[in-house]
Every structure is written in C-alpha cells, then in structure tokens.
Image: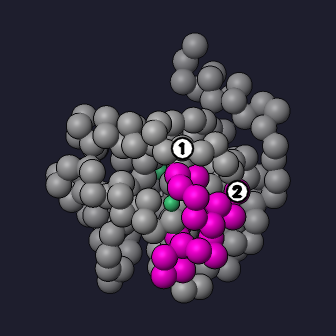
Amino acid sequence: MSDRAQREDMFEGAPREPIPKILFSFYEDRPFVSCTRCGESLSDFSDGYKVSKNFKKGEVIIEYALCMPCMENMMNEASEESKRVLHEFQEEHFRNVSGFEECALCEKTRDTARGEEFGLTGICQGDDMIDSAMICIECMEAMSEIISEETRGKWNRFREENFPGVPGDFEPMPEKPTPMVF
Ligand SMILES: [Zn+2]
Ligand SMILES: [Zn+2]
C-alpha cells in the first residue's frame, strides 16, 4: 500500500475534533493557514499537517505548522543514525496517550513539566484535529541529545530561519512510533 493510501486509511474513523484554540497561531490569532516552511495553503494538503507550539511559563516560545511533505523533508534531512536513535527512543518510551495533559513519553503531566515547559502537537486535517500529544521539556531535551550534531544543526537552521531570535533547543521533530503523533 502506498504511504498515502495508508494515511487515508488511518484517518478513517479517527476521532476528529475542531482544532482547539490552544493550537491556533498565537501571532495571527487564528488557526494556521499556511505551512511555515513552504508557505503553501494547509487546506490543500489532504494528507494533513502538523501544528506544534512550545510553551514556557505560559508563553508561546515557538510555533509552526508543517505540511506533510515538509515534515517528511525535515525528517529526511536527519542522518540515518539520528533517525534510528529517535525511533528507538520513541519505541521505548511511547506511552500511547494522546491529548495535552500527559507527556506522551514519560509520566509528567503538563502541570508538572519542569519549568512549565512543554510542547504541544496536533495532527490536523482541514479544520479538524485528528491526533494530539504533549511532550515535556525533559523528553524534548533527551531527544535533542541523542541526535547527531549534524542533524541538530540542520533542524536548528530551520528554527533560525523561521524564528529569528528564538534561543534554546528546538524540538527535534521525532518520527512516529505510532500513527504520526508527532
Ligand atoms: Zn510545506
Ligand atoms: Zn516527558
């Protein structure tokens, strides 16, 4: 089965809900309309797209939306070694929880995340959210540490190009262990 066919299958019967406000673009005060990387209209991607926002002490530090082709390209820019270690990390830690209350990779809740720092991710299609995850800062750091210098550099460039002035570690966009949660 092609990737696309698999994805459409996966969306079928998935619980859908309108994209919650917390995933709206903070800067634009509305849902994301275009891909942060290629600028294409997100509603044109039947495969869906991913919205990510990182928060620290209640403030949005970084936010972006990526269409699936851009997400795949970002992943493909990672070294084979980075892809492998990320995949293993997630296989090992994934807790099979969705939603924004509990870290998908450890037992931290949103309220107990160190320094009130965490990332929220939604997999969306059109105006709906199909899957969601919270990742606490410690798990983001753990993933950032295991990827290669080169991969980290490439992903950091994406951050610098799109979010000048945003310091710190950029969420390393892990691969899915399960249906594209991240
Ligand atoms: Zn794109
Ligand atoms: Zn965690």
- Foreground of the two, 92 or 7: 92
**Quadrant (top left, top right, bottom left, bottom right) of the N terminus:** top right
Say which quarter of the image contains residue 86: top left
- Is 171 placed left or right of 54 in the picture? left
Q: Spot the residue most to the left.
A: 150
Q: Which residue is labeled 2 in the image?
A: 99
Left or right: 100, with 34 as reference point: right
- Give the residue at mark 1: 94
Which type of secondary structure does the marked residue at label 2 adopt?
Answer: loop
Q: Residues within 10 Å of mark 1 (few under 14, many from 20)?
A: some
Left/right placement of residue 85 relative to residue 69 reads left
Coordinates of residue 174 in the picture (x, y in percent): 43, 48
**Residue 49 part of the magenta-drawn span:** no
Residue 174 visible to the viewer: yes
Please determine whether, in this image, residue 66 is positioned above or below residue 179: below
Occupied quadrant, residue 5: top right
SS under mark 1: loop
Name the residue located 76 percent from the left edge and 65 percent from the top edge. 20
